[in-house]
Amino acid sequence: MSDERAAEFRKRTLANWTSDETVAAWRRWHDKIATQQREVTEALRDAANIAPGQSVLDLATGSGEPALTFARVVSPSGRVVGTDVSEGMLVVAREFARREGIQNIEFAYADAEQLPFDDGAFDAVTSRMGVMFFIDLERSLNEIHRVLRPGGRVAFAAWGPMSDTSMFSACLEPFVRRASPPDPPPGAPHPQRFAASGTLSTALRKAGFSSVAEETRITAAPWFGTPEEQWQSFCDLASPPYVDDMPEPDKSEATAEAIENLRSLYDGTAVQTRAAVVIASATA
């Protein structure tokens, strides 16, 4: 990837994740997203072998998960550091840590490409749905390897195939059918960057990690709320430009179809969506 292209991707990514609207949306939906992604968080915990007493680094922590969950796992003597490139997100994460009375955690500004930590400082490094947005993946993986102690574990969760992820496909299919969006440029940060089997594990091996493992799981991803609420959260958190920018009347028609798709999965308590998730792990 050229320096010019990397700079453009970095600019776009930062603009998205640091905007006041994005930060407010993650504050609003934090609790329900934590519940919806509980199975992913548990899979990361197991893949990273997180245990009491450990020191854990969670990258691209956003509003604080899964770092908050891991802080409970490693307590009372362990610690967790959650990092993000959005100062606004870190403010929100600290709010939730105070709300939950979690004291063995800190949140710090850091880019995965240049981590401000000593060599071998952590027993485990994790990232839930953040690795897809690392601009310079090779440099980031090298930094992760550096801050892990020998024998320490890294574990990533990334979105798997969209066709197996009804929490997104139910919302997007009506728009894709009308808009036919182009594929993202090669190397671009985007949600489906590591959906193809083996792509993330190949990067880990190239970076010098050992005992590399990768699997794609179909996880339960229930939204405990109405279909209309899940649609609103999707618009706030995950809708791509071709959804936001679609002209009328197509946009209204596609929106109605998307909500009806979600309604077909609603059992009166939760929208019972599922998600394909790539879990990749390795040893330093």
Image (cartoon, rainbow, N blue to C red):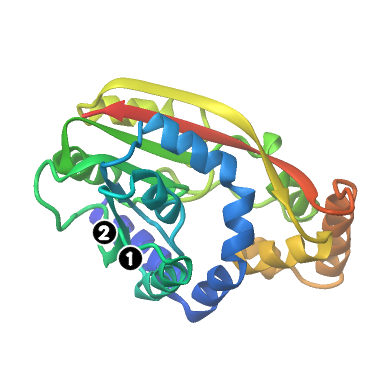
Q: Return the residue found at the far front.
A: 76
Quarter of the image with the C terminus in it: top left
Query: Is 248 on the left or on the right of 189, as rendered?
Result: right
Query: Is 166 on the left or on the right of 237, as rendered?
Result: right
Q: Position of residue 144 (x, y in %)?
A: 22, 42
User: Does residue 177 appear in the picture of this structure?
Assistant: no
Query: Is 40 on the left or on the right of 106, as rendered?
Result: right
Labelled disc at residue 7: none
The residue that label 1 is drawn on is: 85
Which element carries disc 2, helix, strand or loop? Answer: loop
Q: Is residue 63 above or below residue 1?
A: below
Which element carries disc 1, helix, strand or loop? Answer: loop
Q: Is residue 230 above or below residue 177?
A: below
Query: What type is the residue that disc 2 sits on?
Result: Asp
User: For the point 32% across and 40% down, which residue is it?
Assistant: 52
Q: Quadrant of residue 122?
A: top left
Between 120 and 246, the one nearer to me in the picture: 120
Q: Position of residue 128 (x, y in %)?
A: 45, 47
Q: Quadrant of residue 178?
A: bottom right
The residue that label 2 is drawn on is: 111
